[in-house]
Image (cartoon, coloured by chain):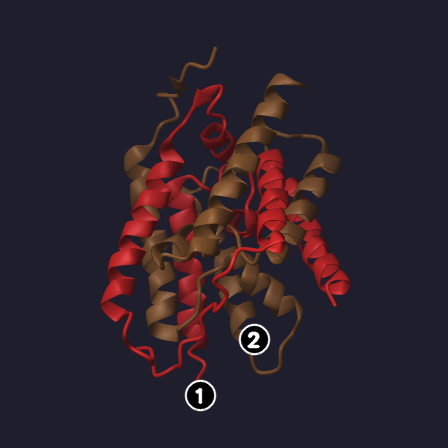
Amino acid sequence: MKQNHHYLYKFLLGLMFGLGLIISGMIYPAKVIGFLNIFGVWDPSLAFVMFGGITVYTVLHFLHIKKVDTLLGYTKSLPLKTHLDKRLIIGAILFGIGWGLAGYCPGPALVSFGTLGFEAVVFVLAMIGGMTLFKLTSK
Amino acid sequence: MFSMEIDWVNFTPFASLLGGVILGLASVLMLILFGRIMGISGIVGTALERPKNDTLWRLVFIAGLISSAVIFAPFVDIARTVPIETNIWLIVLAGLLVGYGTRLGSGCTSGHGICGISRLSVRSLVATGVFMVAGIVTVAIMQFVF
């Protein structure tokens, strides 16, 4: 266990991720709905977000893939599950329905929460409620 | 019949690509520096469970995310951060579904959609396909049925 948690870096990573969500347009629910609206008038912009994000991550991840420890000396802690199960599928369906209803996924909802908009605050509180409900019922 | 119509007015390929590159960089830095997946639902959900010695950094990260709209305010069009859906009970339902669903399905757009797909995880590829189809169907129903 490292004593130095590099909290400033963690804060800056949160800030940087927020900037990416802002610049990309992902924080705008109407834009998200426009992307999901393939049967109406479709706005393909968010496909460019995924393409940019996946390309950068894939390349830099590949260069670092064989290292056991990180640049700051932490041991990697990555998901180990590889099999598909009902929880994954049902969870993704429920998430997709909620995403399509409001146009917020967790990251953009938290960024909008920072503007103290009424709907964003309500959404984030409900999201925390949903996560808590999961925790209480999954034991 | 189905015919694709592109929304050229709202199409922002360059800004969205740039934003995606920033998201990818921040996400891969989380891996390269700290060895963790940049999954927002996982970070928030785990913070709620308050694991000892492992909660504070998540709260600090979330604080950075929440501050971004204030710190980068000149880039934010506040009026557009409001959902189209105005029924507050539907917003509550959406929040509950997103919170519960992302925890049950072990991830959201960031953890599955960016990190997982890039790491060639079949689970993430399937989850991303499923939540995108569920979102597309939901938007279609809201638009054409109601």
Residue at horizontal 54%, vertical 64%?
Answer: B43
Q: Residues within 10 Å of mark 2 (few under 14, many from 20)?
A: some
**Residue A77's image quarter?**
bottom left
- Residue A71 lies, with reference to residue B124, above or below; the image says below
Chain that is brown in the image: B
On what subunit does the disc labeled 2 rest? B
Residue B72 in view here? no
Residue at horizontal 43%, vertical 85%?
Answer: A4
> For the view shown, which residue lies furthest in the top direction?
B1
Chain that is red in the image: A
- Asked if residue A34 lies left or right of residue B13, the reply is right
Residue at horizontal 72%, vertical 42%?
Answer: B92
User: Residue beneath label 1, please?
Assistant: A2
Q: Are marks 1 and 2 in contact (CB under 8 Å)?
A: no
Tell me the element at label 1.
loop
Residue type indicated by callout 2: Leu
User: Residue beneath label 2, please?
Assistant: B56
- Asked if residue B63 lies left or right of residue A48, the reply is right
